[in-house]
Image (cartoon, rainbow, N blue to C red):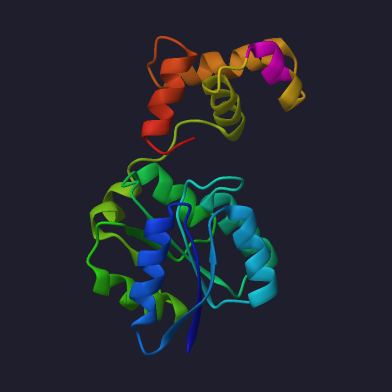
Amino acid sequence: MIRVLVAEDQAMVLGALAALLDMEEDIQVIARASNGREAKAQIESQAPDVVLTDIEMPEMSGLDLACWIRAHCPQVRVIIVTTFARPGYLRRALDAGVRGYLLKDAPAEDLARAIRNVHRGGREIAPELAAEAWSAESPLTAREREALRLAGEGLSSAVIAEKMHLSEGTVRNYLSEAIGKLQASNRIEAARIARQNGWL
């Protein structure tokens, strides 16, 4: 029996995924979580074989959860199930150790098959994303990405500098580099472009 935890912040989708998987003879949904922190606690207490998670969730994103799982519970396999058909997200998911990346509009039977394959040690990537992902690498450095993410939240250079433990001038340099690389006219547009590509 493959023990699965489903983490999804939309209650209807969470219920539907769990009900769908409970129809499979060899798959058992042992826990549900509506945010990343809840999922983390369930993983520690329930020890699932496979975690299904969305990317954007309250308190801890699916990508942050995947990074934590890779560091603390490497035996647990992670499958992202999302609406975000963006190559940048897929690249970040693979970098975080995710073994599967499926889109929510995929046929229902694909999900059970993906869980079995990933549980055996395989990899499952939505075919429409697989080829594109390798040509859509982020041009931003980790520091530029962080500065741009904070700028996109409307924070000033001074506040960003404080949060990143950098000088204000260094933060302005990072933002200027990011704006140039993304051919944007300002930091807000740059953040929007980066987010659309799944780089933030």
**Is 100 drawn above or below residue 134 in the view shown?**
below
Please state which of residues 180 and 10 is positioned toward the viewer in this rendering. 10
- Residue 164 horizontal side relative to residue 74, left or right: right
Please state which of residues 141 and 186 is positioned toward the viewer in this rendering. 186
User: What residue sits 50% from the left and 30% below the top?
Assistant: 140
- Residue 158 horizontal side relative to residue 187, left or right: right
Q: Position of residue 167 (x, y in %)?
A: 75, 15
**Is 42 drawn above or below residue 103 in the view shown?**
below
Q: Main secondary structure of the magenta part?
A: helix
- Residue 82 horizontal side relative to residue 58, left or right: left
Q: Position of residue 169 (x, y in %)?
A: 69, 10
Instruction: Specify start and end residues of the magenta stretch as a single range.
Output: 156-161
Please tell me in which quadrant of the rendered image residue 96 appears: bottom right
User: What residue sits 43% from the left and 56% below the top?
Assistant: 11
Q: Position of residue 36 (x, y in %)?
A: 59, 54
Could one spot residue 123 in this view of the protein? no
Please state which of residues 33 and 198 is positioned toward the viewer in this rendering. 33
Q: Position of residue 3 (x, y in %)?
A: 51, 81
User: What residue sits 69% from the left and 73% below the top?
Assistant: 45
